């Protein structure tokens, strides 16, 4: 790459490379926003436009230097992206993409109707960029500037993805089995992470606009309309929107293919019928059919998950919570109620749980156990009642606040990120015990904390018997093993109270016995454990107390012996099982 401008390559190739680098900068932002976080934006061209017009105005009207123009563009973009993000990122379904279309279309007409910005004729005489007195007027010099920006964007994004914030970004795409529930249960704000991705994508697009304006030296609104936004999405999807390097492949492939088709098709078909657009569209459909994950997914399929040495000296280095005395009350559930339309899924359920105690929550299918779990952990809002955890009323609090107080959980339907390695999935659990942000990730000042988080993740995986699969993709494990990974992830949060939803489901007998041993050990360490479990041998052998639910109500509460002897339980629960 460094040598290309020095070699006798035609000027056309240099020009193409410059445009590929600028496009790739925008598409890297889309990879983060759309590929990683699952937020589709049709508005990236508008941010390119803001960067381009800000510098055009600053340099031609205000006579500022191009670098000051870059600062102005980035600042303006940040303000607009934060306001737009606050308004749109809470939208669900199709509303977010529609909002970004609306914003892109609106900005196009604003640019075309403001006199100071030259209306549809645009702005001319934009100066070239110079660095320490060296003018980058020639395409061969400008090439270095473009590719420094593109390279920094790519490496910066890769660093971000391999960090505490990046792991959360990688969990929020619902298409990858994620969503908001799990990262919120780890103590992270999903909205703030979405806003971060939206802001970074907008800033990258704005920087691309700056490069574009000083390369072209003249601009008008047409390259910043909705059509161009679609082009960026095509590039991303074609290259592989889940991969940073896919942005480069997509940008290069699209640019080169377009140019080739523009040259060759008129020679084959004659005349000027815009054939390249038609053929390009057909080729795009074919490419997506053959490789739905994009071109880079062919290459990345051969990569193994990243392996690294776990530093044993980093173990136990993350801050730990002070544990309460054995028997001290941890959880007090007071008359909770949950109404789903006409269905009262949970009605007036009360029980409590102390430190160093295992309580089993059992009952037939649909009795309301998982709903009770979700009400305690804050994943669902209470219709009535109160939950007191660790001495604080938490009813109505979001699950991330309850998680930060020391409540950790697993899910009935396993929520791991299948494409992420097992150890990274478990490191997600350390989120609230660590604090490095995105800037620390870019500067790599987070490495010590990361090593500690991974050492903690490895310790918990070893404890649960999964030390041999640390670097496998979580999606490749059996369902039983995935449940164990969830337990390790919950333990990595150093909780006071652990809520386990059917931990033994899908485990073989030996694995169940090993799990029971780990849970008994946790009880010794004065953790509180609440288990929903269908495996009666498992739960009766382990729990100190059992709460039985039926039709949303608490039927009975007592020791395993009392519950097993209860005729009401036999009728309601065991009777059902036997049938
Ligand atoms: N989000 C929801 N909207 C409407 N109804 C719901 C919702 N979640 C659960 N329900 C209903 O509430 C009732 C209790 O469900 P819940 O999942 O809590 O039972 P459960 O005891 O955990 O059952 P299982 O053992 O089968 O998991 C069921 O009738 C279920 O269909």
Image (tube, helix red, strand yellow):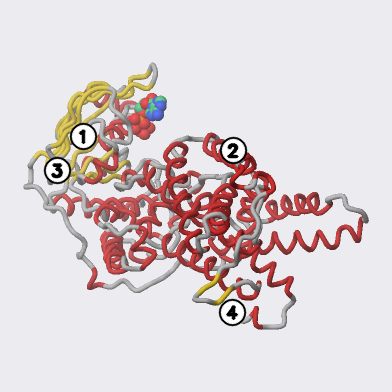
Image quarter of residue 293:
bottom right
Q: Is residue 138 above or below residue 378?
A: below
Q: Position of residue 84 (x, y in %)?
A: 47, 40
Of circles 4 and 3, which is in front? 4
* Callout 3: SS: loop
Q: Residues within 10 Å of mark 1 (few under 14, many from 20)?
A: many
Residue under label 4, please give it: 2
Mark pair 1, 3: CA separation: 21 Å
Give percent across and percent down for residue 343: 37, 19
In this orientation, does residue 365 appear? Answer: no
For the point 44% across and 58% down, which residue is it? Answer: 420
Contact between marks 1 and 3 (CB within 8 A): the answer is no
Question: In the rendered view of the protein, which quadrant contains the C terminus?
Answer: top left
Closer to the observer: label 1 or label 3? 1
Q: What is the tally of numbered marks visible in this picture?
A: 4
Q: Are the residues flagged by discs 4 and 3 in contact, CB closer than 8 Å? A: no
User: Where residue 254 appears, x then y in whole percent?
Assistant: 70, 59
Residue depicted at 12% across the width and 49% down the height: 526
Q: Quadrant of residue 365?
A: top left
The residue wearing badge 1 is: 394
In the picture shown, does residue 84 fall above or below 238? above
Disc on the earlier residue, 2 or 3: 2
Residue 357's disc number: 3
Considering every residue shown, the one lying at the far top of the view is: 342
Disc 2 target residue: 106
- Label number found at residue 288: none
Q: Which is more N-terminal, label 3 or label 4?
A: 4
Separation of marks 1 and 4 at Cα, in angstroms:
58 Å
Q: Quadrant of ligand 1?
A: top left
> Quarter holding the N terminus?
bottom right
């Amino acid at each position: 790459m460094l040598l290309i401008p020095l070699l006798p390559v035609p000027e056309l190739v240099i020009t193409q490379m410059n445009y590929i680098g600028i496009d790739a900068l925008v598409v890297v932002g889309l990879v983060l926003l759309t590929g990683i976080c699952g937020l589709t934006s049709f508005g990236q061209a508008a941010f390119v436009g803001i960067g381009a017009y800000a510098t055009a105005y600053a340099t031609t009207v205000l006579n500022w230097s191009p670098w000051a123009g870059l600062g102005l563009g980035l600042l303006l973009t940040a303000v607009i992206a934060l306001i737009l993000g606050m308004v749109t990122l809470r939208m669900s379904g199709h509303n977010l993409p529609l909002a970004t279309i609306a914003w892109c279309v609106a900005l196009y007409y604003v640019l075309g109707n403001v006199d100071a910005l030259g209306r549809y004729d645009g702005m001319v005489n934009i100066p070239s960029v110079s660095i320490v007195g060296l003018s980058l007027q020639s395409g061969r010099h400008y090439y270095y500037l473009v590719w420094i920006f593109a390279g920094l964007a790519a490496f910066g994004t890769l660093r971000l993805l391999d960090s505490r914030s990046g792991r959360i970004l990688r969990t929020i795409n619902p298409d990858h089995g994620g969503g908001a529930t799990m990262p919120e249960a780890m103590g992270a704000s999903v909205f703030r992470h979405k806003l971060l991705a939206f802001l970074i994508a907008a800033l990258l697009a704005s920087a691309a606009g700056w490069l574009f304006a000083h390369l072209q030296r003249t601009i008008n609104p047409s390259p910043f309309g909705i059509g161009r936004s679609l082009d960026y999405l095509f590039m991303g999807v074609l290259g592989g929107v889940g991969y940073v390097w896919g942005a480069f492949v997509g940008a290069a492939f699209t640019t080169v293919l377009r140019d080739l088709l523009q040259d060759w098709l008129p020679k084959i078909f004659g005349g000027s019928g815009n054939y390249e657009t038609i053929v390009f569209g057909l080729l795009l459909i074919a490419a997506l059919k053959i490789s739905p994950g994009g071109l880079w997914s062919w290459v990345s399929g051969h990569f193994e998950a990243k392996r690294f040495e776990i530093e044993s000296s980093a173990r136990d280095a993350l801050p730990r919570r002070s544990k309460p005395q054995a028997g001290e009350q941890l959880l007090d559930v007071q008359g909770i109620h949950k109404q789903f339309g006409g269905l009262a899924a949970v009605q007036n359920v009360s029980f409590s749980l102390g430190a160093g105690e295992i309580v089993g929550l059992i009952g037939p299918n649909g009795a309301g156990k998982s709903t009770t779990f979700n009400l305690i952990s804050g994943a669902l809002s209470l219709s009535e009642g109160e939950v007191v955890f660790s001495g604080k009323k938490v009813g109505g609090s979001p699950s991330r606040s309850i998680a930060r107080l020391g409540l950790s959980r697993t899910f009935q339907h396993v929520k791991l990120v299948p494409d992420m390695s097992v150890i990274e999935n478990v490191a997600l659990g350390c989120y609230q015990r660590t604090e490095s942000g995105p800037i620390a990730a870019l500067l790599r000042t987070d490495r010590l904390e990361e090593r500690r988080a991974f050492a903690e993740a490895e310790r918990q995986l070893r404890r649960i018997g999964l030390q041999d699969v640390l670097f496998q993709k979580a999606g490749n494990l059996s369902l039983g093993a995935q449940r164990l990974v969830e337990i390790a992830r919950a333990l990595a949060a150093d909780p006071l109270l652990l809520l386990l939803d059917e931990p033994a489901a899908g485990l073989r007998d030996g694995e169940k016995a090993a799990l029971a041993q780990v849970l008994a050990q946790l009880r010794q360490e004065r953790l509180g454990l609440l288990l929903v479990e269908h495996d009666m041998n498992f739960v009766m052998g382990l729990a100190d107390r059992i709460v039985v639910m039926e039709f949303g109500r608490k039927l009975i509460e007592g020791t395993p012996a009392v519950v097993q002897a209860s005729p009401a339980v036999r009728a309601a629960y065991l009777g059902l099982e036997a049938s």
